[in-house]
Amino acid sequence: MITQTLIVAAVCFRDGAGRILTVRKRGTSFFMLPGGKSEPGETSGAAALREVYEELGATVAKEDLALLGSWTAAAANELDTIVDATNYRSDVVIAPVASAEIVELRWVDPTVTTELDFPLAPLLLEFVFPALAA
């Protein structure tokens, strides 16, 4: 039974090999896009940019974001919770550094997710990766 909905914003970054940057937050096991919850009065785009700076130490301008899509999926790390996520993509090349609650970064080839030895968030597998392939 779903007991709560988290409203989040996230950003999809690719490296030169086309891999997608994923992060794992402290105390969790699933990898997901960098991002998080909006603060009161904050737009999804502003939240995404703030979270990218806090989590990765990367500064990205709002004009460097393009809407990838908005989807709802099971939350990766919270039971009985769904995420309502606004997802952006950015072509900016970043040199991410795990900061704040991020304990691990991994670049993932979205075409070979069945061969991974670590779990990815349902939102990535069900919506983000298919949208990138379209």
Image (cartoon, rainbow, N blue to C red):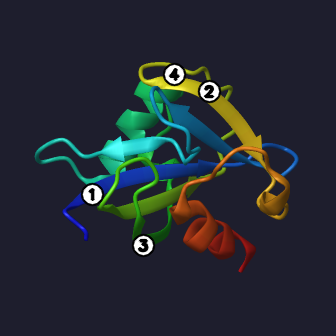
The residue under label 1 is 7
Q: Secondary structure at mark 2?
A: strand
In front: label 3 or label 4? 3
Q: Residue 23's spot in the image, x, y percent? A: 58, 37
Q: Residue furthest front?
A: 1
| Local crowd size for mark 1, using a 10 Å CA cut-off: few (<14), some (14–19), many (≥20) | some
Q: Which residue is mark 4?
A: 57
Of label 1 and label 4, which has the lower sequence position? 1
Name the kind of residue labelled 1 in the image.
Ile
Mark in the foreground, 1 or 2: 2
User: Mark 4 or mark 2: which is in front?
Assistant: 2
Q: Position of residue 52 (x, y in %)?
A: 46, 35
Q: Residue at x 38, y 53 (%)?
A: 9
Q: What's the distance in space between the residues labelled 1 and 2, CA to CA?
A: 23 Å
Looking at the image, which is closer to me, 21 or 42?
Answer: 21
Query: Would you name the residue on which mark 2 appears?
Result: 104
Query: Label 3 is placed on what type of residue?
Result: Trp
Q: Which numbered disc flags the more N-terminal residue, 2 or 3?
A: 3
Pointer 3 residue? 71
For residue 127, above or below residue 108? below
The amino acid pointed to by label 2 is Glu
Whether pointer 3 and pointer 1 mark residues with C-beta atoms closer than 8 Å, the reply is no
Q: Nearer the viewer, residue 47 or 23?
A: 23
Q: Amino acid at mark 4?
A: Gly
